[in-house]
Image: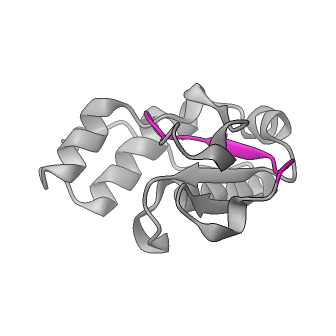
Amino acid sequence: MKTSYYFSNRIREPGMNLIAVSNSYPKQLSWLKDARQYKKLFPGWSLVKDFKQHKISWQNYVEIYQEDILCKLNPEEVYSSLGEDAIILCWRSRASSATGDLLQTGFMIICKSKLMNCKTNNRR
């Protein structure tokens, strides 16, 4: 599993297993015509909006995303559905704040250790 972003020059070859994991993606880009959307991993508009409006930090975004999305999924099933050669795409290119990198790291940790800290608390 790899991560990238929609406007990367590295994802333009035909036949790549491109997976969109954001609420929207630039459909006008020809190399994304065969990209699959995996809605179970979408962060939700309210979470994205809160982050974009600086109502929550990236760390808070990560915690909420892990609890509300990742902790509710079976990581082995998702990883299998996406495929070993999946390239997870999101809008942001910065690794420090990209949903794709969060997913890749989260799934690798979960699949190897089968542990995830899924706390219930009020963070917003």
* Above or below, comparing residue 28 to residue 58 in the picture: above
Q: Quadrant of residue 78?
A: top right
Residue 89: x, y in percent? 59, 51
Q: Residue at x 43, y 61 (%)?
A: 92
Q: Quadrant of the C terminus?
A: top left
Q: Residue at x 87, y 51 (%)?
A: 84
* Residue range (magenta): 14-25
Q: Quadrant of residue 67?
A: top left
Between 122 and 69, which is closer to the camera in this rendering? Answer: 69
Q: Main secondary structure of the magenta part?
A: loop
* Above or below, comparing residue 67 to residue 89 in the picture: above
Q: Locate residue 2 relative to residue 50 in the image: left or right.
A: right
Residue 26: x, y in percent? 48, 42
Q: Residue at x 31, y 31 (%)?
A: 45
Residue 35: x, y in percent? 69, 38
Q: Locate residue 45 relative to residue 2 in the image: left or right.
A: left
Q: Locate residue 51 relative to residue 87 in the image: left or right.
A: left
The number of numbered badges drawn on the structure is 0
Whether 15 is among the magenta residues is yes
Whether 55 is among the magenta residues is no
Q: How was the colour assigned to the protein in this rendering?
A: one colour
Q: Quadrant of the N terminus?
A: bottom right
* Above or below, comparing residue 4 to residue 62 in the picture: below
* Above or below, comparing residue 94 to residue 27 in the picture: below
